Each structure stands twice: as C-alpha cells, then as structure tokens.
Amino acid sequence: MFFDFNSHPKLPMALFDQAKELYASLEIDVEEALSVLGSTPISLHCWQGDDVGGFEGTSGTLGGGLAVTGNYPGKARTVAELRQDLEQVLSLLPGRHRLNLHAIYGEFGRKAVERDAITAEHFRGWIDWCKERGMGMDFNPSCFSHAKAADGFTLSHPDAGIREFWIEHCRRSRAIGAAAGRELGGACVTNVWIPDGMKDRPADRLGYRRRLEASLDAIFSERLEPAHHIDAVECKLFGIGSESYVVGSHEFYFGYAVKNQTALCLDAGHFHPTESIADKISSVLMYVPELLLHVSRGVRWDSDHVVVLDDATRAIMQELVRCGGLSRTHIGLDFFDASINRIAAWAIGTRAAQKALLMALLEPSKRLKEAEREGDYTTRLVLFEQALALPWQAVWEEFCRREEVPGETGLLQAVKDYEAGVLAKRD
C-alpha cells in the first residue's frame, strides 16, 4: 500500500522506520540501497515527448520499422516545449538523471541541414541545458525516417553511396557525443541502431552483414577519448517491415562488440516476446567492457510500450545487482506512447525502472548466495518470495520525500495539473 506524505505525514515515517529495522534484521542496509539508487541515473529518451518526430523541419513521416500509436493532446512542437516537458518530468523523478538525444533533435533554425553535415553546434543548446542542470547526455544517430532509408537499408545498403552517407552521419554523431561528454564532464554513450532488414526471406544474409561490418569498422575507425565517449551497438530480432530478417541480429552485434570491445545495447523489447534480457546480462558482461540497457516493454510484436513494474523489469534490475554489473551498465529508456499523457508515460516508466532497482537492492543477497552455495534451495526460494513481501514501498516513499518529488498518490495530480496548465493550451 502507498501513502500520501501530505495527508499522512507521520504514518509513512513510522512505516519507514519499521521497514528499515526489518531490513536490518536480514542484514540489508536500507541507507546504502538508497545511496546506490540515488546515484544511478536513468537516461531519459527525448523522443517520448514528441512521438519520434524531431526538429529537422521536414514533413517526412516516421519510418524504418518505427510506429507511434495515438494522438494525445499536448505534443511538444518545438525544442523549447520539449525542454519544458522534460523539466516537468524531472520534477516528478527522485534521483539524478541523464538526457538521451537523437540526432534529429538538433536546433537547425530555418536552414535544412543534411544528416551527414550535423555538428556539435546544432546541439549547443542541449549541451548547455544539460550543463545548467548538472546532467549527463547520451546520443544516437538517426538512421530512419529519411529518403536514403526508405527501402529499409542504411549501413548495409548495396549502394556504396548510400552507405557512405550513413557512415558519415554516424561519424558525426560520435563527434557530437564526444563533444557533449567532454563539456559535461563524463562519458556520453553514442548508440548505433539501424532498421536494416527485410519483410520476406533474404537470399543473401551474409552479404548484408559483411557490408554492415565494414560500415561499422569505418565509423569506429577514429579512436575517441573513453573518458568522454563510449560506443554502443544495438541488436534487434525483427521489426515492422523486417519481420523475416534483421541484418543486425543479437549474434551479429554480440560478436562485433566482443571482437571490437564496444559496449553492447540490449533492448528489452527486441527479442522473442517470452525471452528476457535478464539472463543475457551476466554473459554479456563477461566479454564486453560495458553494457547499455534500453528498458522497454514488449507486447507481442511491438517493442516500445511504457515500462511498468512487471516481472521482466524486476528481473533485469535483479540481475544487474546480483552479478555486480551496475558499475559497468548504462540504463536508458526506450518507449514512445502517444495514446496517453506523454509526461505521465515518461514519469511512470522511469519510476518503474527505479522501483525495480530499489527492490533488487533490498534483496537479502548475502543470505540468498549463502543458501545457494550450501545447496539449500528451499531457503533460497523462501527468501526470494519473502523479498517480494517486504515493505519496499515505505522505502520508496521515503526516497521520494527526501528528493522532494511526489509520492505515488501525488503523481497523477501533478501530471493533471501540468496538462491543464500547459499541455491543453498547445492545441
């Protein structure tokens, strides 16, 4: 049960004190868990705020295996409105977070700037915005929704000229990411995802993958300072319009990341509907230097539903904590839902990821591992189930109180107030 701190100022504090004492009896340090939670940023994806539209000033439609459902009022139409919405989201989130930016979100003014000509100056406003807020920034080339991606291929395209266009776009995206990392005082993760694939069976799977490998080698040929920049590559099982074949499969990118020691991005919605990325985390971290997670929620063939506190999200965070992988993992979100209030979607998804991480940090990990080493699987199962029933909600509410953001019962009203005062006036 969640409590409203404004309505019950004494009761939640009493519950937290009792919860802290109970966790201590199980050798769990609540204050340490809150410290780790507060210092673990979630990278907020800018594209939730405007349905992956961007600000290139073109009338192109979303493509490349991407689709957004719904037309809820209040969509951000300008960079200023998107920043306004992000600031509202940040006011609803405990902890400190990062911004995840796609290349189509630059500030290009009235001038058309091709994607193979973008520079850090087109993102100066975003870098300064992050600097003012003490936030880090991550970056992504946008290899979709473009005439040179209309047939579903970019870095693996049979046409060398088209491949070179996208190679240069990715090179410039890396340079932008490195500039952001340098100015913001921490590494920017630049993640390469491409939509390349086919709706029906291909005749030459290997040919496309060899071209993709060569393109990636060309993109990553310039060494960038690791303190400022981290490269990541992202796989996918299938997409809309690429149901039968995706060039950048998990096996392809895992092999590439191991060979070249880049970070590997695992997106929770990019695998079979019943396949969890949680089981992959410990294996991947054995062979690649760093991991990028896109926390999402797959529903059947769609991969980008708002994150909720479900078994899959909890399993991801549990594995990160259990295998000691948090320090080598970058956690970001990747979903876009225009059927509901976009501010709510951001806040619900981010807070769900944080709650899942808190639950993982509050597991009786020492006792669990001891029971497993001793072959006492009965105790292990009891402890797993017991952890679900422990009063982690009281700890979450205390975290929100300390961070001066709404608790669970205050979130909806804050969203509705912003909708009435800001979003409703945009349409």
Image (cartoon, rainbow, N blue to C red):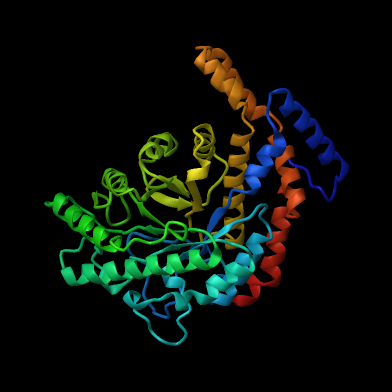
Q: Is residue 262 above or below residue 173?
A: above
Q: Is residue 98 left or right of residue 287?
A: right
Q: Position of residue 423 (x, y in %)?
A: 63, 71
Above or below, 426 relative to 135: below
Q: Quadrant of residue 92?
A: bottom right
- Residue at 39% in and 78% down: 59
Q: Which residue is nearer to you in this view: 357 or 133?
A: 133
Q: Residue furthest bottom?
A: 110
Residue 384 x, y percent position in the rendering: 58, 24
Q: Residue at x 49, y 63 (%)?
A: 181
Residue 256 picture location, percent across and down: 28, 48
State the residue lying farthest toward the right: 10
Judge whether residue 395 can be spotted in this image: yes
User: Viewer-proximal residue, 288 or 355?
Assistant: 288
Q: Nearer the viewer, residue 373 or 84?
A: 373
Q: Residue at x 51, y 76 (%)?
A: 124
Furthest toward the left, the residue is: 203
From this view, report whether residue 277 is shown above or below residue 332. above
Q: Which residue is depicted at the point 43% across and 80% down? A: 57
117 to the left or right of 415: left
Tell me if 266 is positioned left or right of 153 in this view. Answer: right
Rendered position, 306 above or below 173: above
Image quarter (top left, top right, bottom left or bottom right) of the N terminus: top right
> Residue 232 at x, y = what percent?
38, 54
Quarter of the figure with the C terminus: bottom right
